[in-house]
Every structure is written in C-alpha cells, then in structure tokens.
Image: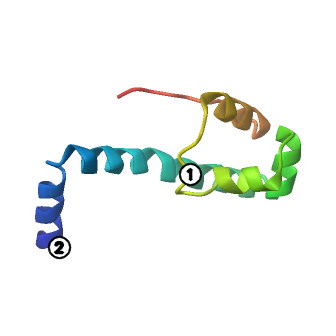
Amino acid sequence: MVRVRSRLKEDFKNPEFRKAFDEEEVFAPLAIQVAKIRQKKKLTQLELAERLHTTQQTISRLEDIHNKSYSLQTLIKLAGALDKKLKVELV
C-alpha cells in the first residue's frame, strides 16, 4: 500500500495525469449515480429514454463510466426526467 501511495504522489506531479485523474473523479461517479437513481425508480433504460425523447443507447452512454461527453443541457433534462435537481459546483 505504501508503494501505491508513493507512486500516486509521484504521478500527481504530472499535470496530464492529475487532469485525467480529476476528470475520472467527476465522470465515473456521475454515470454510476445516474444508473442508481434510474434503478431505484424502477425505470429501464428504455423507459428513461422515452421520458427524454431519446434512445436507449443514449441512456446506456450516459451510464457508461468512460463517457465524457455530458452537456449541461443533457444533465438538466436528465435531472428533470428523474425528478431530481441538478447542482453544479466549482470547488
């Protein structure tokens, strides 16, 4: 574990690594959150897609932890379709 921490400490000195790490910290949890909320509401991807007037494949992409193409407008529509509010913060 000490080796991993030491390696991460070194990797964080690289601006490209840090940027990629920070992006993953946003996109992956967002995709997981979308899927969890949809499942909690007992909606299929197709049912959510119909609420958003889009395709099941689009919902699948929104729930893909590697997807980095969210737009703010999409997130606003998605929040509404899931009866949620969207909160965006810069920290």
Residue type, label 1: Asn
In the image, what residue occupies the spot 54% across and 57% down?
A: 65
Please tell me in which quadrant of the rendered image residue 90 appears. top left
Q: Is residue 66 left or right of residue 6?
A: right
- Give coordinates of residue 35: x percent, y percent: 66, 55
Q: Which amino acid does label 2 sit on?
A: Met
Pointer 1 or 2: first along the chain: 2
Neighbour class for label 1 at 10 Å: few (<14), some, many (≥20)? some
State whether residue 43 appears in this view: no
Q: Which residue corresponds to mark 2?
A: 1
Is residue 63 found left or right of 82 in the rendered image?
left
**Residue drawn where x is 65% and y is 50% of the image:** 62
| Residue 84 percent location from the top left of the image | 69, 35
Q: Name the residue under label 1.
A: 67
Give the residue at x 18% y 59%.
8
In this view, 54 is above or below 4: above
For residue 77, the mark is none
**Residue found at the far front of this picture:** 16
Q: Give the class, few, some or many, for how many residues have Cα within 10 Å of label 2's Cα (few <14, many ≥20).
A: few
Query: Is residue 60 shown to the viewer in this render?
Result: yes
In terms of depth relative to the viewer, which is nearer, 76 or 83? 76
Tell me the quadrant of the picture where the N terminus can be found.
Answer: bottom left
- 39, 52: nearer the viewer: 52
2 versus 16 height, above or below: below
Label 1 to label 2: alpha-carbon separation: 29 Å
Residue 36 position within the rendered picture, expressed as x and y whole percent measured from the top left? 65, 56
Residue 11 pos. (x, y %): 17, 56
Helix, strand or loop at mark 1:
loop
Q: Which residue is drawn at 57% across and 55% down?
A: 32
Name the residue nearer the viewer: 83 or 46.
46
Mark 1 against mark 2, which lies toward the viewer?
Answer: 1
